[in-house]
Image (cartoon, grey):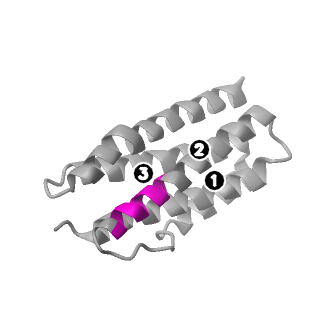
Amino acid sequence: MYNIEKIDSLLKNEISATETYRQALESFWKDTRRCEVDSLLQICQDHNEAAALLKAQIRQLGGAPSDKSSNWGTWEKIFQIGVNMLGKYSAIKALRDVEFSCSKAYGQALLDYQLPLALRSLIETKLLPNLQSNMRTLDQLLDAVMA
């Protein structure tokens, strides 16, 4: 049986990402165009949905999913520093780093031959493609900020 703690680690990453995007939305709400807010909201919803799907996987395997985020409090702090000191570009870049970190964690999970088939399929067909799409969206936002 696959180690539920490994899936829970992925879940905690998604919870952390959701929290970071919520902070981004609070910070950007006033100074951002509606289309940018909509993009960030969609990415936040993607991470929230990913967390729900991972919770379901953990329950299917007989585990109890965590409701706590990973020790990514650092991401949230970096994000807030970026907003406060370095502006929107650095903040969006920090969000892109969140996406990259999640993507890397899923890539590592896919290397595990004991990964349950249902979870492998979920990662390959939904979670990683969403992250790749999110990174493209954030790249577009970065380009718009630089223009």
- In the picture as drawn, the residue positioned furthest to the top comes out as 147
Q: Secondary structure at mark 1?
A: helix
Residues at marks 2 and 3, CA–CA distance in whole angstroms = 13 Å
Residues at marks 2 and 1, CA–CA distance in whole angstroms = 8 Å
Q: Position of residue 147 (x, y in %)?
A: 72, 22
Dot 3 amino acid type: Cys
Q: Is residue 3 left or right of residue 123?
A: left
- Which segment is the magenta one? 50-59
Q: Residue at x 71, y 31 (%)?
A: 145
Q: Secondary structure at mark 2?
A: helix
Q: Residue at x 50, y 65 (%)?
A: 72
Q: Are marks 2 and 1 in contact (CB under 8 Å)?
A: yes
Q: Position of residue 65 (x, y in %)?
A: 41, 72
Q: In the rendered structure, which disc, 2 or 3, sits on the residue that comes first in sequence? A: 2
Question: Which residue is tagged 1?
Answer: 21
Instruction: Say if residue 81 shows up in the picture.
Output: no
Question: Which residue is tagged 3?
Answer: 102
Q: Residue at x 45, y 61 (%)?
A: 13
Frontmost residue, 71 versus 46: 46
Question: Which residue is tagged 2?
Answer: 43
